[in-house]
C-alpha cells in the first residue's frame, strides 16, 4: 500500500512538472519606469500646482512668477517623495527623488537652449529670408534703409578667415603641447600644465589687450584680421591643450607598451598609436577651442576694429567678425538694424553647427575604423589579389612544355 502511494505521488509530481513545461514563460519587465512611478509623478505635479495656485490666489498676496515656479517645484519634490514612500523604502525614495532632480535640471537646460535658439531665429526671421543678407555688405546701407538692402557678407568672410588662421596656429601647437605634457612627465611639464590651467580662465579682454600691446604697439602691425586671429588663438590654445591632454592620458598604457615592445620609438608610438586612438577626443578638443574663439567679441574689437565694407585681406585693414557685427548692429535703435543683428547671431549659430558636423565627420570614427569608400577600395584590392594568386596557382599547376616533343607525358 505504501508503495502504491509513493508511485501515485511520483506520477502526480511528474504530471505537474510536465504541465508546467507546457505553460509559456511570462516575459519579465526590465524597464526602470513603472506605472506607479508615472502615477506618482502626475499626482505630485497636480498637487503642487493646485496648492501653489491656492496659496497665491486665496491665501497670500504673492504675484512673482519666479516664486510660483520655485515653490511649485519644491512642493512637487516633497509630494513625490511622500507618494513613493508608500511603495518603496528610504534608499529607493532618495534614489528616485535624486533622479527626478537631475532629470528636471536636464530638461531645464534643454528648454533654455531651445528658447535661446528659437528667440534668435524668430527675431532674425525678417532678415534671413532675404538673399542679399548673405551676399552683400553694409558699406552702402544706412539705418533707415529696408532689409532688402545690405547684408553681412563682410562679417562672414572675416569670421571664416580669422578662425581658419587661429586653427592653423592653435591646433599644431595645442596637440604638440598636449603630447609633451602626457608623454614627457617632469617638473617642467607640471609647470606648463599649471600655466595652461590658469590660462583657461583668462578673460577675453585680457587676451585682446595682450595682442594689442605686443603685436600692434610694439611690433607695429596694423589692426587687421591677422591680429584678431592671434588674439583668438590666445583664447583657444589653453582650451585645446587642456582637453587634448586629458584625452591623451586616457589612452591605455598597454598600447604604448606593445608599441615599444615591437621596437617603435617614442615619436612613432605617438604618431601611429596614441594620436589615432585618441582621434575622436582630440576632435572634441578642437571643437571646444573653436567654439570658444568663434564667439569672442572684445578681442576682435581691440585688434581689428569695425568696418562696414568687405575686406578679404586679413593682413591689412579692419576686418569685422560675426559676433562683433551682432554687437554693432543690435546697439542701433532702428528695427532694421536689430533684425540684422539677430539674423547675424542666427547665422553664427548655424556656422558653429556646421563646423561641429564637419569635425565629427572628419574625426568621429574610432581608431582603425574605415569609411565606406575605404572599405570598397579594400574589397577591390582583395579581389585583385585573389585573382592574381589564382593565376599564379594555375601557372604552377600547368605541365612543362617542350618545343620539340610537346608537353611532357604524365
Image: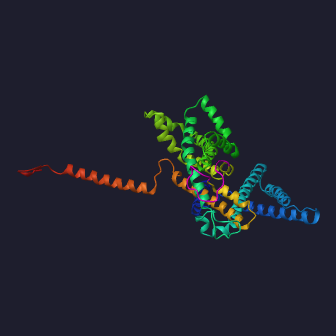
Between residue 36 and residue 190, name the one nearer to us. 190
Residue 135 located left or right of residue 382: right
Residue 366 located left or right of residue 293: left
Q: Residue furthest left?
A: 404
**Number of disc labels:** 0
Q: Quadrant of residue 336?
A: bottom right
Tell me what residue is drawn at x 58 percent, y 65 percent: 135
Residue 16 located left or right of residue 368: right
Tell me what residue is drawn at x 77 percent, y 50 percent: 94
Between residue 17 and residue 134, name the one nearer to us. 134
Q: How is the image coloured?
A: rainbow
The magenta stretch spans residue 314: yes
Residue 221 percent across, percent down from the top left: 60, 44
Residue 247 percent across, percent down from the top left: 58, 43
The answer to whether residue 343 shows anywhere in this view is yes
Q: Is residue 334 above or below residue 270?
A: below
Q: Is residue 147 above or below residue 347?
A: below
Q: Residue furthest top?
A: 187
Tell me what residue is drawn at x 64 percent, y 32 percent: 191
The answer to whether residue 356 shows anywhere in this view is no
Q: Is residue 235 above or below residue 84?
A: above
For the stretch drawn in magenta, the main secondary structure is loop
Q: In the picture, which quadrant includes the N terminus?
A: bottom right
The magenta stretch spans residue 76: no
Q: Which residues are magenta?
A: 302-318
Residue 16 percent across, percent down from the top left: 60, 60
Between residue 124 and residue 259, name the one nearer to us. 124
Between residue 6 and residue 400, name the one nearer to us. 400
Amino acid at each position: 500500500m505504501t508503495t502504491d502511494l509513493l508511485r501515485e505521488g511520483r506520477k502526480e509530481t511528474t504530471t505537474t512538472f510536465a504541465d508546467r513545461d507546457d505553460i509559456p514563460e511570462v516575459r519579465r519587465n526590465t524597464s526602470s519606469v513603472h506605472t506607479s512611478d508615472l502615477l506618482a509623478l502626475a499626482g505630485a505635479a497636480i498637487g503642487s500646482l493646485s496648492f501653489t495656485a491656492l496659496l497665491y490666489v486665496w491665501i497670500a498676496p504673492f504675484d512673482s512668477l519666479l516664486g510660483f515656479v520655485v515653490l511649485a517645484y519644491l512642493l512637487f519634490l516633497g509630494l513625490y517623495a511622500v507618494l513613493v514612500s508608500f511603495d518603496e523604502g528610504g534608499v529607493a525614495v532618495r534614489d528616485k527623488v535624486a533622479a527626478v532632480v537631475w532629470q528636471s535640471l536636464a530638461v531645464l537646460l534643454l528648454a533654455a537652449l531651445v528658447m535661446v535658439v528659437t528667440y534668435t531665429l524668430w527675431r532674425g526671421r525678417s532678415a534671413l529670408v532675404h538673399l542679399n543678407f548673405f551676399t552683400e555688405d553694409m558699406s552702402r546701407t544706412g539705418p533707415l534703409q529696408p532689409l532688402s538692402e545690405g547684408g553681412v557678407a563682410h562679417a562672414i568672410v572675416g569670421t571664416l578667415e580669422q578662425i581658419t588662421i587661429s586653427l592653423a596656429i592653435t591646433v599644431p601647437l595645442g596637440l604638440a603641447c598636449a603630447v609633451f605634457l602626457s608623454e614627457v612627465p617632469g617638473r617642467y611639464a607640471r609647470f606648463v600644465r599649471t600655466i595652461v590651467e590658469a590660462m583657461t580662465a583668462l578673460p577675453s579682454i585680457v587676451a585682446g589687450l595682450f595682442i594689442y600691446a605686443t603685436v600692434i604697439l610694439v611690433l607695429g602691425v596694423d589692426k587687421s584680421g591677422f591680429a584678431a586671429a592671434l588674439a583668438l588663438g590666445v583664447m583657444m590654445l589653453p582650451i585645446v591643450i587642456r582637453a587634448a591632454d586629458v584625452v591623451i592620458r586616457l589612452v591605455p598604457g598597454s598600447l604604448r607598451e606593445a608599441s615599444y615592445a615591437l621596437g617603435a620609438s617614442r615619436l612613432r608610438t605617438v604618431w601611429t598609436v596614441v594620436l589615432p586612438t585618441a582621434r575622436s577626443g582630440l576632435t572634441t578638443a578642437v571643437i571646444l577651442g573653436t567654439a570658444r574663439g568663434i564667439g569672442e567679441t572684445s578681442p576682435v574689437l581691440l585688434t581689428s576694429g569695425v568696418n562696414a565694407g568687405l575686406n578679404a585681406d586679413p593682413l591689412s585693414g579692419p576686418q569685422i567678425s560675426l559676433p562683433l557685427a551682432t554687437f554693432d548692429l543690435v546697439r542701433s535703435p532702428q528695427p532694421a538694424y536689430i533684425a540684422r543683428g539677430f539674423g547675424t547671431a542666427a547665422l553664427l549659430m548655424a556656422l558653429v553647427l556646421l563646423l561641429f558636423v564637419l569635425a565629427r565627420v572628419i574625426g568621429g570614427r574610432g581608431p582603425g575604423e574605415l569609411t565606406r569608400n575605404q572599405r570598397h577600395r579594400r574589397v577591390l584590392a582583395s579581389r585583385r589579389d585573389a585573382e592574381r594568386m589564382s593565376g599564379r596557382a594555375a601557372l604552377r599547376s600547368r605541365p612543362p612544355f617542350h618545343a620539340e616533343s610537346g608537353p611532357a607525358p604524365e
